[in-house]
Amino acid sequence: ACALENGTEKSAKMAEIYKNLVITRNAVATLYTDDDGKPYKNYLDYSYDKTFGRDYTPDDVTETREAVRQKFVAAYNYMTNQSRNFSSAYTVALTEAQIKKYMPYIIKNTDSSMYNSWQYLMQKGLYDFTVSENKMNTSYVADFAAYGDGFMFINRYGSIGVDLSTIIHEFGHFNALFNEDEQKAGDGSSNYDLLETHSQCFELITLPAVESLFKRYGIKCFDSYAFIKIYDCLWALLSNCAFDEFEYIVYNAKESELTQAFFEKTFADVKSRYIADSSYNYYDITHVFQVPGYCISYVVSLLFSSEIWANDNAIELYNEVVSYGASHYLSEVYQPLKLSNPLTAESVSLVYEKYRSFLKSSVNIDI
């Protein structure tokens, strides 16, 4: 009874905090105007434009969210049922010494021109790969812009199924710090869609090199590693669509509607349409409180990354995207490369087919 009471008390407090944040932020948004001189109708509209540097609005991604839901819910549920058969990568250990042995192989067998970035990371000691209970439960690359440098922080679990893809992901960020073409660089703020493309796409284009590495060193779990990678992609697409839709409903609601019951019912309803197996509540999503509007970037960038991966010249395209840096609108990068607008249903379908063909060839399952 005591635990239930504490849980109820927490829910009520979180709802009160969230309500005040939404009201305050919406009020702040009306003080600013868009490029046409119109006041923003709510904070989500403001954050899409001013915080995240996007050339699309919350209304524009309605089609994207629905296309993702239509294409991937059944596939995600199927993979959830299959996941127990593809968990072996979680049980294979990965030491720090193995990371330093495996990553050069993966990088060189993806694009040897990136190896200089890895050498610099190692030589300068700009990383923390230790396993510790005292480390924050996250991994990231800190950009030291004033020094033209960066630092890679990895919260490791000691498992190849978790850690290898995380380090590959973060190396995509680290490598991008040093490979922006000054002649292509934009003059705006960083666009999270592009920042995440640098890391997400690197994970995908390294898959052939990872498979080769596993064969070379007798690591017999590539099917598990590949399954986990695509399963994680589906989770990222569906969960972040759900979080974005929740915020869309909340920031467009009347102030009188903003109650604990409204927040919890809205989140439960939205979640049931995308990720019914999830135990998340809305107040477990830190971005909802700290950076409203962020979550859709992980969807858009992953769709963009996956379309790049679907091309025969994926590595060349990836390097071109990196060369633009992150201070651009998304359309200023995908249009000159003749890639699709990742917001469209057509792009979602293309990505679905790429995931499907990859799983058929590498894991022998059909979503």
Image (cartoon, rainbow, N blue to C red):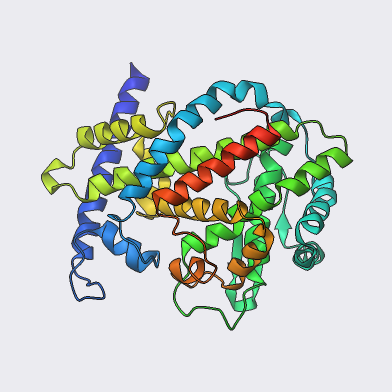
Q: 218 and 208: which one is in front?
A: 208
Q: Position of residue 224 (x, y in %)?
A: 69, 31
User: What residue is at 34 percent from the left and 27 percent from the top?
Assistant: 7
Q: Is residue 302 left or right of residue 118?
A: left
| Displayed quadrant of residue 116 | bottom right
x, y (%) of residue 147?
64, 77
Mark yes or no: residue 154 visible.
no
From this view, report whether residue 61 is shown above or below residue 27.
Answer: above
Q: Is residue 325 visible?
A: yes
- Tell me which residue sits at (83%, 34%) in the image: 219
In the rendered image, the quadrant that contains the C terminus is: top right
Image quarter of the N terminus: top left
Residue 69 pos. (x, y %): 39, 38
Q: On the rendered structure, is 320 left or right of 340?
A: right
How far across and down, in percent of the image, does residue 299 sit? 46, 49
Q: Residue at x 37, y 48 (%)?
A: 64
Identity of the residue drawn at 31% across and 31% down: 268
Q: In the shown orientation, is residue 4 left or right of residue 24? A: right
Judged from this view, the residue extending furthest toward the left is 256
Q: Residue furthest top?
A: 1
Q: Nearer the viewer, residue 181 or 267?
A: 181
Q: Is residue 322 above or below residue 306?
A: below
